[in-house]
Amino acid sequence: MRERAISAAVLVPALLIVLAIGGPAIALAIALITVVAAIEVFRLLHGAGHDAFPGLGVVLAVTIVLDAAFPEVLDGSGLLLFAIGVLLVAVAAMTRQDPRAGLAAWIATVFGALYVSLLAFVIRLGNTAPAIPDGAPFEPLGAERGWILLLILAVWSFDTGAFLVGRQFGRTRFITHISPAKTVEGVAGGVAATIVVLAVLLWGLGQSPAHALLLGPLAALAAQAGDLAESMLKRAAGAKDSGTLIPGHGGMLDRIDSFLFAAPVVSLYVVAFLG
């Protein structure tokens, strides 16, 4: 717990500084996080018996993330860059003497890159979210900072609520083959916490707090699914954590797993219903 507290005391201020600067600082931070997380993903895939091309996978993931930061460069470039990446990995896979090994490496590389590059939706949320109305409490933050902060606090509130309620009242376990500690009561507590926090944040962003009744459960369950997806990958690799980068917390992937699924879900909701 002491290591976790010290790590949080360092990481949270750093995160707040990046958000305060905004723009390029957010894109650069997401790109660096993607590099580290991608390395961890390919290490886990290797541990699970899925050989890949880590270098190509990392480059492909970062390229997709950077494309999200500069959408005006080439319309539809995200899909185009991903297609080119798939082709390059396919060519690399052809160098394997065993076609089955080449096919497996091709699939594993594309999967690992696409999985980690879901973090690009954090940037896309900031770029596409609606402007904050004049006079709204969070207007000084600006749309980019405000909506990304909403995403971050939504995930954190779910994690905190699920941990506290699950620890105190958790009895009914589920998905025990992936994560034995997860309980239905914990998930319910996390969902409730997310709804409350999002209601306040949506009000501050000039939106109806009623949206939290739908966005809250969607964001919470997506965050839970992201956590379980990484747990499945770690169990397949026989690893407790994705790495040792952050004392008390494990690796970078351990810190962003929930965001990988929550970011696209929140982005879709905001664009579809609030944009």
Image: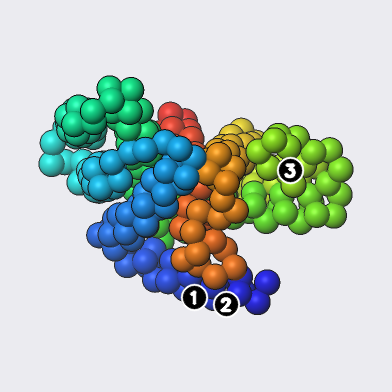
Q: Image quadrant of residue 186?
A: top right
Residue at mark 3: 180
Residue at mark 1: 10
Q: Amino acid at mark 2?
A: Ile
> Where does the image place residue 168, in percent across and percent down from the top left?
85, 54
Q: Residue at x 46, y 66 (%)?
A: 245
Of the image marks 1 and 3, the number of the one nearer the N terminus: 1
Of the image marks 3 and 2, the number of the one nearer the N terminus: 2
Q: Seen in the image, is 273 located left or right of residue 64?
A: right
* Label 1 crowd bin: few (<14), some (14–19), many (20+), radius 10 Å: few
Q: Seen in the image, is 28 located left or right of residue 84?
A: right
Q: Residue 6's mark? A: 2
Q: Residue at x 76, y 56 (%)?
A: 164
Q: Is residue 262 visible?
A: no
- Give the residue at the far front of this rendering: 97
> Where does the image place residue 180, in percent across and percent down from the top left?
73, 43
Q: Seen in the image, is 123 located left or right of residue 259?
A: left
Residue nearer the viewer, 217 or 128: 217
Q: What is the quadrant of the N terminus in the image?
A: bottom right
